[in-house]
Image (cartoon, rainbow, N blue to C red):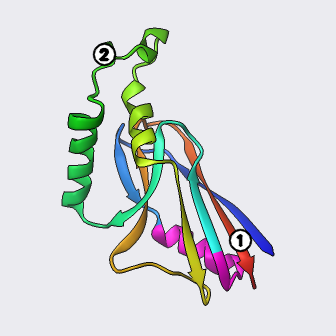
């Protein structure tokens, strides 16, 4: 089995941001030469996520509203974690809810998605440098 590893780096302008990384992941699949296999895409930070969904700005707003309004409001006084001097407990809970990684099949050298599926990086506590690992595994 062949393997290819690449790191994507992000430093978002906003504290919370959703970024479509599908094209960057697809470029690494092509660079790997893998024809049949899988790609693992994983946030390497505990306050970020990687997920598959639709590229639609209204949905992104809905996701952020759902996380902040239903899952874990951004209210630093509410969380014990923030007693350590941090203010990002909600970001940790958002990451637990959305998840930190996805695995996407590769068929004939391409990401093998269903209709409308794209890969996203969800930054929940940004404005500092963070990374995502792209690990392509399979046969050439």
Residue 87: give x, y in percent of width and height: 40, 20
Task: Choose the circle earlier in sequence order: 2 or 1.
Answer: 2
Is 128 or 87 nearer to us in this picture?
A: 87
Judge whether 65 appears above or below 60 on screen.
above
Q: Residue 2 carries which label?
A: none
The N terminus - image quarter: bottom right
- Determine the image quadrant of residue 115: bottom left
Judge whether 132 appears above or below 30 on screen.
above
Element type at mark 1: strand
Q: Mark 1 points at which residue?
A: 137
Magenta stretch: residue 117 in it? Answer: no
Name the outermost residue toward the right: 1
Element type at mark 2: helix
Residue 48: give x, y in percent of width and height: 47, 43
- Determine the image quadrant of residue 35: bottom right
Q: Residues within 10 Å of mark 2 (few under 14, many from 20)?
A: some
Q: Give the range drawn in magenta.
A: 22-37
Q: Name the residue under label 2.
A: 78
Residue 90: give x, y in percent of width and height: 36, 29
Disc 2 to disc 1: CB gap under 8 Å: no
Is 85 or 40 nearer to us in this picture?
A: 40
């Amino acid at each position: 089995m062949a393997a290819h590893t690449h790191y994507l780096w992000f430093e978002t302008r906003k504290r919370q941001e959703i970024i479509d990384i599908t094209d960057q992941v697809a470029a690494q699949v092509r660079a790997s030469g893998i024809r049949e296999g899988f790609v693992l895409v994983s946030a390497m930070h505990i306050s970020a996520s990687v997920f598959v969904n639709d590229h639609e700005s209204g949905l992104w707003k809905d996701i952020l509203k759902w996380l902040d309004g239903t899952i874990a409001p951004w209210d630093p006084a509410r969380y014990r974690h923030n007693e350590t001097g941090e203010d990002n407990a909600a970001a940790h809970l958002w990451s637990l809810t959305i998840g930190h990684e996805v695995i996407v099949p590769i068929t004939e050298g391409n990401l093998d998605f269903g209709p409308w599926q794209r890969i996203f990086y969800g930054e929940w506590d940004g404005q500092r440098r963070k990374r995502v690992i792209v690990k392509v595994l399979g046969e050439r």
